[in-house]
Image: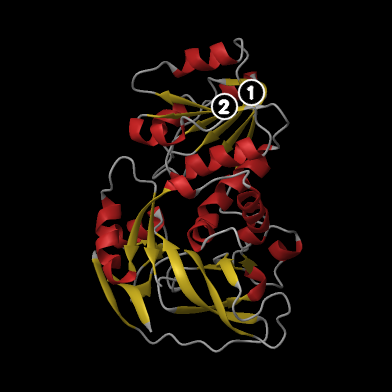
Amino acid sequence: MKALVLEEKGRLTNREMDVYESVGPEDIRIKMKRVGICGSDIHYYEYGKIGPFKVDSPMILGHEGAGAVIEVGKNVKNLKVGDRVCIEPGVPNWNSKAVKLGIYNLDPDLTFWATPPIHGCLCSEVVHPANLAYKLPANVSYDEGAMVEPLAIGMQAAVKANIKPGDVALVYGAGTIGIMTMLSALAGGCSNVIIADIRKEKLDLVKNIPGCVVCNSNKENLNELVADMTDGWGVNIIFEATGSEAVANELFTNACPGGHVVYIGMPIGKVSIDIVAAQAKEIRIDTIFRYVNVYDRAVSLISSGKINIKPFITEHYPFSQAIEAFEYAKSPKPSSVKVMIDLD
């Protein structure tokens, strides 16, 4: 089948690749329709590895996908041929302790699309467990279905934050994940979410969303804005979505006493945080890794209109131009959020 293959660091090909899989009793076969380009895809393309995961042999990229069911296993009851679905890309060992505890995202044996040596979904067809595919309502497009994956990260952060109605939150970073986190926090009950970034073009995309307050850190004083909005008390929740050392150094400054920090961004190396500053306010610190049990909720929020992700699908490329799409995504326009590849 046709696939976008990372042959080695810095070299992509759009070619036929034989990765045929039979459909097991609990599986479905999906004809891929849309796949979003993620920062991890770009990182593998540019550097050939992420942490311990190294591309040692040709690998199909892509893990943000939606498509149509074209075959179902004999035990599959929840889906049928023709159903439109989005796909959760991580497959755990269903007998693991992590699965039994409800934290399958932390299963050491979990395999994840486009994480070496596992192939991704930027190809004609994939076979996947049916219980990790979610039917798209009629009013949710394939584009939106492919965006459920990054939205799920924001949803996981919002769940970990234990949002109370009326909370005020601060998101550091207006990249894809920062924006998805802001949307999730508002849908989860925050009255206002401040989103801080140095890129005006990104902030312009979200500034008119009800409840969203933007802060251009190059021109505005974030500390003064938070103090003004909260009468000097500080925000209830801080979401870190940059992985920046500079943000780590000031992470607790704008949190209120008894506040909550949720760490989403992954620093390239080690960063320092001021534990005493956190202790003085008894700030709780949570981290997230991908997501667990939020995909169906994300689909429902999109379908209901509570979350609108359409404005953040900023570029489309046909599959025939997938390599050009990756070249663009390496150095996109400042206003770019999500590059989508169409496999129709």
The answer to whether residue 175 shows anywhere in this view is yes
**Residue 263 visible in image:** no
Q: Are marks 2 and 1 in contact (CB under 8 Å)?
A: yes
Q: Residue sitting at 55 percent across and 89 percent down?
A: 22
Label 1: which residue? 279
Image location (x, y in percent) of residue 317: 32, 62
Residue type at mark 2 is Ile
* Residue 98 horizontal side relative to residue 51, left or right: right
Q: Residue at x 62, y 81 (%)?
A: 27
Query: Does 242 appear above or below 217?
Result: below
Crowding near pointer 2: few (<14 within 10 Å), some, many (20+)? Answer: few
Give how far apart the Cα atoms at labels 2 and 1 are: 6 Å
**Which residue appears at 39% of the width and 46% of the height?**
337
Residue 188, quarter of picture: top right
Residue 199 image point, x, y percent: 34, 32
Secondary-structure class at tag 2: helix
* Residue nearest the observer in this picture, 143 or 238: 143
The front one of 93 and 240 is 240
- The one nearer the camera, 98 or 186, is 186
Q: What's the residue type where badge 1 is placed?
A: Gln
The residue singled out by tag 2 in the image is 275
- Say left or right for 32 vs 28: left
Residue 329 is situated, as x and y percent measured from the top left of the image, at 30, 53
Furthest-front residue in this view? 139
